[in-house]
Image (spheres, rainbow, N blue to C red):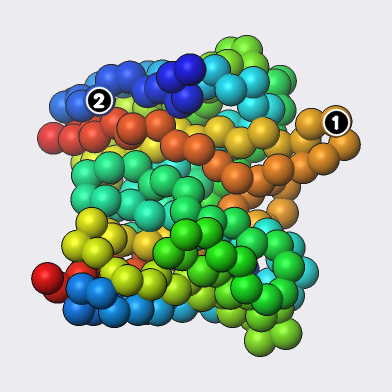
């Protein structure tokens, strides 16, 4: 059974600090990795995708991938109250499917 | 460009009733998906369609059927609703395989909140 694991949280971070979200996966051959944000009562929206080992930066967001250790992380710099949401990690499985973690709830405290 | 649209937004059914959830995308995507999301849980795949004319079971297909009507539309049918099917249902699409390149990024509709009494 291929799995994606995330700490359910909630993770509480002060405004302006760095929020660090982590995700581990079990399928060694996975090649595509995604972070989605989901506000309460809304649908998931893509934040970032990453395919190669290392860091990928987009504005305040940085995704980090380490295939050898089978983890992917998301850093949010200068956290804002509007970043409060549940963050979903997804990993490509077989046959065009994504395997989803249960999500980490992030709370940014003003 | 509306992206992925779903109807209805809300629905209340009685046990044993049937209904069809509609999904359409205008992004010329090949692949489409139906998920359910229950409180505190991640997304669970019900059915997916890798390309027009094909459908496959996901993790939790029991009690559901799907139809890929054309490239744009992918419907989900509950033949005899049960309280265990109370959930939020999301439709998603992704480019899939196009011109020899596979793109997995999925784009979601706004969801349907279904309650079965």
Label 2: element kind: loop
State the residue in front, B40 or B99: B99
Label 1: element kind: loop
| Farthest right residue in view | B100
Task: Determine the residue positioned at 87% across, 36% down.
Answer: B100
In the drawing, does residue B2 fall left or right of residue B96? left
Task: Determine the residue positioned at 34% across, 42% down.
Answer: A43
Dot 2 or dot 1, earlier in sequence: 2
Q: Is residue B38 visible?
A: yes
State the residue in front, A103 or A65: A65
Find disc 1 in the rendering and name its residue: B99
Q: Is residue A84 visible?
A: no
* Chain letter for the residue marked with disc 1 in the picture: B
In the drawing, does residue B47 fall left or right of residue A84? right
Q: Which quadrant of the rendered structure holds the N terminus of chain A?
A: bottom right
Task: Determine the residue positioned at 32% across, 27% down.
Answer: B80
In three-dimensional space, the C-alpha distance between marks 2 and 1, rounded to whole angstroms, equals 34 Å
Horizontal and vertical percent position of residue B45:
50, 47
Find disc 2 in the rendering and name its residue: B9
In the drawing, does residue A33 fall left or right of residue A52? left
In the drawing, does residue B89 fall left or right of residue A93? left
Disc 1 residue crowd, few under 14, some 14–19, many 20+, Cα 10 Å = few
> Do callouts 2 and 1 point to residues on the same chain?
yes
């Amino acid at each position: 059974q291929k799995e994606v694991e995330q700490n359910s949280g909630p993770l509480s971070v002060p405004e302006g600090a760095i929020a660090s979200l982590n995700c581990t996966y079990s399928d060694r051959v996975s090649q595509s990795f995604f972070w989605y944000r989901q506000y309460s009562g809304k649908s998931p929206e893509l934040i970032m995708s990453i395919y190669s080992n290392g860091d990928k930066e987009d504005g305040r967001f940085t995704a980090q991938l380490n295939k050898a250790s089978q983890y992917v992380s998301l850093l949010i710099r200068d956290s804002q109250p509007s970043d409060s949401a549940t963050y979903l990690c997804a990993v490509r499985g077989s046959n065009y499917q994504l395997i989803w973690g249960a999500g980490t709830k992030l709370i940014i405290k003003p | 460009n509306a992206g992925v649209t779903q109807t209805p937004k809300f629905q209340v059914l009685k046990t044993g009733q049937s209904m069809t959830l509609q999904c359409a995308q205008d992004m010329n995507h090949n692949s489409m998906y139906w998920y359910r999301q229950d409180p505190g849980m991640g997304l669970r795949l019900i059915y997916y369609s890798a390309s027009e004319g094909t459908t496959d079971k996901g993790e939790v297909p029991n009690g559901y059927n799907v139809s890929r009507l054309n490239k744009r539309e992918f419907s989900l049918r509950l033949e005899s609703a049960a309280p265990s099917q109370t959930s939020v249902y999301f439709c998603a699409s992704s480019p899939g395989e196009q011109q020899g390149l596979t793109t997995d990024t999925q784009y979601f509709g706004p969801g349907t909140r279904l309650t079965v009494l």
